[in-house]
Amino acid sequence: MINYMVRSNYLHEVQRTFGGTGNLDVMGFFTQALSVLVPMILVIILWRCRRKIIFLAARLVTRTLFSRHRKIIENYFVSRGVVLEICLYSGGGVGRRLCSARVTRVVGGKMELQLLDTNPVVAKLKSARVICLMKPFAYSGKRINAFVSFISHMERRGIVIKELSVMTPIRYKRIIRRQHARQRVAREGTVRVKVWSGRKASTFWMMRPDLQTVNNPARYGEYTRLAVENISAGGMRMYVVNPKGPLPPLQKGSQLVLRVSIWNPKTKKYTYFTALGTIRSRFSGRGGAIGLGIQFTSEGEPVGSRYSWHTVNGGIQSLGKFLSQLQD
């Protein structure tokens, strides 16, 4: 008992020496901790939401100054049933495609949408930054085909988006969607393409192609074949001529393995590129042909007896360099 009292008195003396009261001030401790933590948490939250905060502030200004012009454009969207292609805004450009939707109503600074087709989504995308693309139209002498905004509301069931609305943007503008100049293929045979379904990406080199171009189209009559219209580092545009029989999936969003061979007049040889492409558009061509707009999403690299796929953003650099050399 004496030892305990001595130690207790000793500790109290130490506390008094360093300015303590002898009793632990719990409320004072928590007050000091919160005075540091709360500002830190606020700074982190503001930094993470900085883009949206800046967006809302700038939009408030433009809605006040240019409300009439904005209302005319938004009424045009609703009356014409304008279809938007909604993609994630990634690295200053067009990222992963989410869906296409028709504008049904604009109210309270939000665009309510009728979904037409959607791609599977796993992540929660509320407040995600998106870019909305549309067919270009003219207003006050300016062409408009896109705007950047944020998702205001989203509901999904499993991986399927069921409801979606986006905020009205700061401004409606024209965005040049094509990052790479397309080179037109003037003569069949200068660009050869073999195509496999994307499901065969791990074994495509062991199988016959599902579709391919031919050197002399006149000799193939009514047989199904491919014809390339143009090509760039970011993708290509081609046609399935005389489509019949079993075909690989050719719907929007489907993936294809592409083995592209381009004739190099300088070396008198073909240069090969292997890519995984996603069908971004499908349209009708002459004589019942199926037109496809394809974006390159991955580049294939041979590793031993198989291929390794590497995701590309903004196109295949080696292909872009090769095409630029052909123009020189």
Image (tube, rainbow, N blue to C red):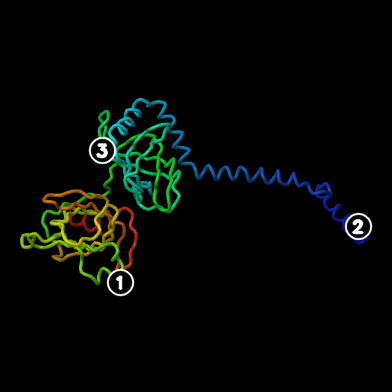
Instruction: Please name which of the two marks, 3 or 2, marks the residue nearer to the observer.
Output: 3
Q: Is residue 34 above or below residue 223?
A: above
Image position of 174 with respect to 202: above or below: above
Q: Which disc is residue 5 wearing?
A: 2
- Secondary structure category for the residue under label 2: helix
Distance, label 3 to label 2, CA atoms, is: 87 Å
Instruction: Report the quarter where the C terminus lies.
Output: bottom left
Image coordinates of residue 319 in percent, x first then y, are: 25, 58
Which residue does the numbered mark 3 point to in the structure image? 136
Q: For the view shown, which residue lies furthest in the bottom direction?
A: 305
On the image, the x and y values in percent for residue 2 come to 94, 60
- Mark toward the start of the polypeptide (1 vs 3): 3
The residue under label 2 is which amino acid type? Met
Disc sitting over residue 306 in the figure: 1
Mark positioned earlier in the residue sequence (3 or 2): 2
> What's under tag 1, amino acid-wise?
Arg
The quadrant of the picture occupied by the N terminus is: bottom right
Determine whether, in the image, residue 167 is placed left or right of residue 199: right
Image x and y of residue 110, in percent: 41, 35
The one of 143 and 271 positioned closer to us in this rendering: 143
